[in-house]
Amino acid sequence: MTEFAARIDKARAAIAASGVDALCLSLGSDLPYLTGYAAMMSERLTMLVLPVDGDAVLVVPELEAPRVDTSHGIFGLRPWGETEDPVAVVDRLLGGADVVAIGEETWSTFLLGLQQRDEHRTWIGAGAMMSGLRVIKSDAEISALRTAAAVADGVQMALRSQQWSGRSERDVSNEIRDRLIRGGHESAKFAIVGSGPNGASPHHEASSRVIQRGDAVVCDIGGHQDGYASDTTRMFVVGEPPSGFDDAFEVLREAQQAAVEHVRPGVTAESVDQAARGVIADAGYGEYFIHRTGHGIGMDTHEHPYIVEGNETVLEPGMAFSIEPGIYLPGEWGMRLEDIVAVTGGGAERLNTTDRSYTVVD
Amino acid sequence: MTEFAARIDKARAAIAASGVDALCLSLGSDLPYLTGYAAMMSERLTMLVLPVDGDAVLVVPELEAPRVDTSHGIFGLRPWGETEDPVAVVDRLLGGADVVAIGEETWSTFLLGLQQRDEHRTWIGAGAMMSGLRVIKSDAEISALRTAAAVADGVQMALRSQQWSGRSERDVSNEIRDRLIRGGHESAKFAIVGSGPNGASPHHEASSRVIQRGDAVVCDIGGHQDGYASDTTRMFVVGEPPSGFDDAFEVLREAQQAAVEHVRPGVTAESVDQAARGVIADAGYGEYFIHRTGHGIGMDTHEHPYIVEGNETVLEPGMAFSIEPGIYLPGEWGMRLEDIVAVTGGGAERLNTTDRSYTVVD
């Protein structure tokens, strides 16, 4: 049995256990996780219909049918032509299904269309059941994450010997994307370059701001390699660090280290958050750490388990997530350090291994 | 009044006319069209709540709040913290709204969450009302599309003097993405390089296949510049064209030309499709033209009006769309020619202006 066939069997068992009659997957990583095929994001619906006791069928736009590998035989193909209504096609495939689970990222327009065609069906989110399948990574998956992390690490290392001052954030960001692709990534999903005060906006996009001496720069980069995500943040300082930066950075390093050291099977996700947050709060920076400590990673950059207060998920070997505390002083500077870690039998393996000191650049 | 404030007023008038109490917009271009702010695609909900008679509020993850420009005063900001439930925040903002329109690309997980919180509300798709606002472009929008098209045209021109044989599709595709970015695009959304038999898969992604003499290559490229999309397809032939290619290509050029010449105010979208399809069918290639003739374009690469059988939308000045017939012989070759056109007072302006002959390359 192929890995995909085994995964589909597990998905079928999961929906049966939940009292669900069929699973519908469209955009997002659940579909390629089960089948190897990723839906294209567009107004043309792609949807796998997996009945609890019947053959799986992939409903796909006719012009995209040539992209689909069906040699594995794990699903049938139902191409729909440009003048057909794909929602009607899915509705007919669902037949008498009363309870249907639908992938989290499916566009609402398709869910509403399906709901209107049969008002007696109950729709539930497929998120919990699918993340239940995906949250424990196989050795091959951890290896893929390790490879992706190594490429991102290589880019962070290469940035150390570059000229920074006088260049726009966007220019550095474009260099990062280019280096990720040349390193083997099939996509460079983000390349945050937050310089000076822009660093205080955690999800800042690279702008036309010209990097100058005295800037601290948040560099948070990632993409996908062979279907698995990379995500790592390092700090760069152009010349001299800004006022107050060094003291806070020591706190940040300690917080990140404390959280990594806390990771082991049996502890909760929220306790890892607390391990980092406690260090930052004790040093008086608590109000400046405005996001969770981390997120799971795999085929998606963000997936379960989320390392956040309230998440009582107990860690198990094979889980993988980021540990990325930050401190953000509005109008002044920001800082974040991020590694991906995999839970092992006795603790955590860091998949990102570059030096966590900030790098002084010109 | 700013342009955004005027658009929000129009949206409010549209929802009032539809008997809708509130509009909820998340992912996709509807939100930046109305506000200038685009939601980040993630598991953290961003949603504008626009009541028919009340102030608009943008619900946004706290860590992304620094990215939001609120100086225009057209919406209030409701940042939500990492331990809050954003669906509950939106539900409270909706208050007594009975009928709510939701953006097409909103993830199902959020729609299901909102439906479960108040089972008496009726949810409808916001697609038709939002495309009603967006389908007629202003002069400034047509100008933005013209600029984006010119950059993509420049990339197609540059490809004419490159070496093709011996390079992988992916290598050429990466060059295209790089050139689009260097030309000023903020994103290179796609760079289809379909060589030889791969060209017969209309949405083929660039692969490791090495381009060789005798290949015809479909080159369909686009991205975004200043928020507006580019999308153009040209054909390249490495050395000598494959058997049967020249005859079919003459038919394709005629079909594309016939469709462009057919465009003018007052004709239907489907009649433009028929103008291209008729030429191809009459020449005996009908079964190999497996997609609609085109799609609207603006902030989205694909939007209304779709140039497809069954779409009786009557064209008006200010509409913009692609005209991109294709002929695909499975296992052998494919071909497509694509220009963006804007409907004018008396006909159509082509925004892509490079030569539509195929280019012979080495």
Image (spheres, coloured by chain):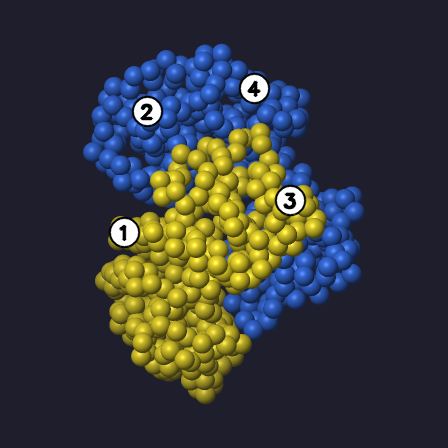
Chain colours: A yellow, B blue
Instruction: Give the CA distance from mark 4 to mark 3.
Output: 28 Å
Q: In which quarter of the image is residue A135?
A: bottom left
- Mark nearest the camera among 4 and 3 is 3
Badge 3: chain ID: A
Label 1 packing within 10 angstroms: few (<14), some (14-19), many (20+): some
Residue linked to disc 1: A184
Residue type, label 2: Glu
**Tag 4 and tag 1 share a subunit:** no
Residue most extreme to the left: B166
Question: Residue at the bottom extreme?
Answer: A282
Q: What residue type is labelled 3?
A: Gly
Secondary structure beneath disc 1? loop
**Residue under numbered circle 4:** B274
Circle 1 chain: A
Whether residue A239 is visible to the viewer of this picture, yes or no, is: no
The image's mark for residue A113 is 3
Pair 4/2: label in front: 2
